[in-house]
Amino acid sequence: MPSRVLLISANDYDVPYPVFPLGLAQVNAALRAAGHQTRWVDCLSDTEPIEEIVATFQPDVVGVSLRNIDDVAFKKRQTFYGLLLKVCARIRQCSRARIVVGGSGFSIFPERLLERSGADFGVQGEGEAGLLALLAALEQGGDPRGIPGLVYRDDGRIRRNPQSPDRLDRVVSPEDRPQRLVHYYLEHSLMLNLQTQRGCAFKCCYCTYPLIEGRRHRRRPPDMVAEELAEVAARGARYVFIVDSVFNSSRDHVVETCEAILRCGVRIKWGCFLRPQGLTAEQMEIMARAGLTHIEFGSDSLSDRVLETYQKNLRFEEIRHAAGLAAAQKVDQCHFLILGGPGETKETIEETLANSRKLPGVVVLPIVGMRVYPGTTLHARAVAEGLIREESDLLDPCHYIAPGLTAEFISNRLAEFVKTDPNWIIGEPPASFHQLVGRLRQRGVVGPLWTYFAMLQRLPQPPPGGMAP
């Protein structure tokens, strides 16, 4: 017998812009295809009280998704899991429905968040197959304890089953993106998102992608990706961001996906994360022809010594080459950097600053310190160096700063450097940038706006209470 499933996106963070809850659309597609009845609640855009929705919909199961644990910023250290806990508590007070928690944020701390939320079950990693199997077990009175990725209570203990890779050929159709949510996200950001693959085979010391999606790259059929891109364009999206951990996992993936987009004839701007390694002029050219306008490179450092310690398995000259290819195609690019992680010194910071001037027309987005997450090699290093204990609760952010450095020193050096290189964007954007964002969106400017922020930094800033000359 089909179940009534209420899906809740427990995210209310919209900086720098609101992000459509794509994970729930994918889960919704799997549930709908299996005959289950679903309804969505989006904590960022919906205003109707959850209690009223529960009373009207009368769900058998409530799935609550947590996108992010925190903002990974050393200074601000804003956490987001509190909303998950509040939502679960409110559901528990007004319904006897089973509560299942999941999402990428949950998947990093599955036992801890199941315990704190009081939910009945959790699904670590990909949610579609696990939730479908759990619903089948609950409906038929079966034992769910063997379901891959399931997090559950057993004899007073919380247990977690190993994950299993899921199929990626499910169609995400218009029914899986409720119109009211599409309207909200297009109104506030002019963009939607999609995924072309899952998994990450790289071994960056801090990264949780392999823990969430597995280490093997698994592709969606290229024609399916192109059709979904055409569908979101038809819904009014003028820009799409591809949320893969890295889009260029292989040459074949890049070329075949872009060829499918070109065959489909959809004309829409898009952006993606790229690894600055192994790129060719052919790949960059076909991505640009298929609509690529913005690249976010996960470079992390511009010092070979630090790149090695970060386990990036790439070198600065490869980053420089990738930046040159993007510049040649006139594709906007930014490079994310992490300053102060393992192996960083004052000398390597200066090397990164100097090398950034060798990159043509890029924007640099640095963060200070490296967020420590369980299950990563950074976590093991932090334990070995005595920064944390093996049993430390890392739900509240802990950041690694290399011995001999302090966050204050790095921040001060960045503040000094940006005076001569406004392409580096550090700290929180000023009020003038948020005003600029509103004006640009009204004029139909789409995509990330870090290029405009860098331009703003070149302008004379008004004195407090005054106007710029």
Image (spheres, rainbow, N blue to C red):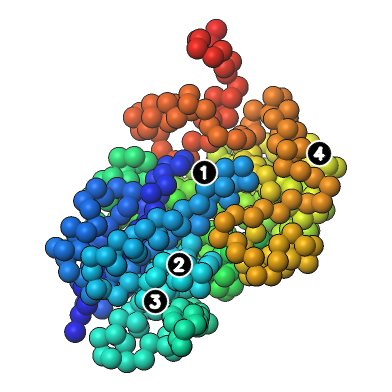
Q: Residues within 10 Å of mark 1 (few under 14, many from 20)?
A: many
Kindly report the distance in space between the C-alpha atoms of the residues bearing marks 2 and 3.
Answer: 12 Å
- Which residue position is annotated with label 1? 294
- Whether residues under marks 2 and 1 lie with C-beta atoms below 8 angstroms apart, the answer is no
Q: Sequence-wise, which precedes: disc 2 or disc 1? A: 2
* Mark 2 or mark 1, whichever is nearer to me: 2
Residue sitting at 24 percent across and 57 percent down?
50
Kindly report the distance in space between the C-alpha atoms of the residues bearing marks 1 and 4.
Answer: 27 Å
Quadrant of the snapshot with the C terminus: top right
* Left or right of residue 176: residue 210: right
Residue 282 visible to the viewer: no
From the top left corner, tell me how far across and down residue 21 is, in percent.
37, 56
Q: SS of the residue at dot 2? A: helix
The amino acid pointed to by label 1 is His
From the top left corner, tell me how far across and down residue 8 is, in percent.
31, 61
Q: Residues within 10 Å of mark 3 (few under 14, many from 20)?
A: many
Q: SS of the residue at dot 4? A: helix
Q: SS of the residue at dot 1? A: strand
Name the mark on residue 350. 4
Name the mark on residue 116. 2
* Mark 2 or mark 3, whichever is nearer to me: 2
Identify whether 316 is placed above or below 65.
above
Number of callouts: 4
- Whether residues under marks 1 and 4 lie with C-beta atoms below 8 angstroms apart, the answer is no
Q: Quadrant of residue 382?
A: bottom right
- Which residue position is annotated with label 3? 121
Kindly report the distance in space between the C-alpha atoms of the residues bearing marks 2 and 1.
Answer: 39 Å
Q: Sequence-wise, which precedes: disc 3 or disc 1? A: 3
* Mark 3 or mark 1, whichever is nearer to me: 3
Identify whether 44 is placed above or below 468.
below
The amino acid pointed to by label 3 is Phe
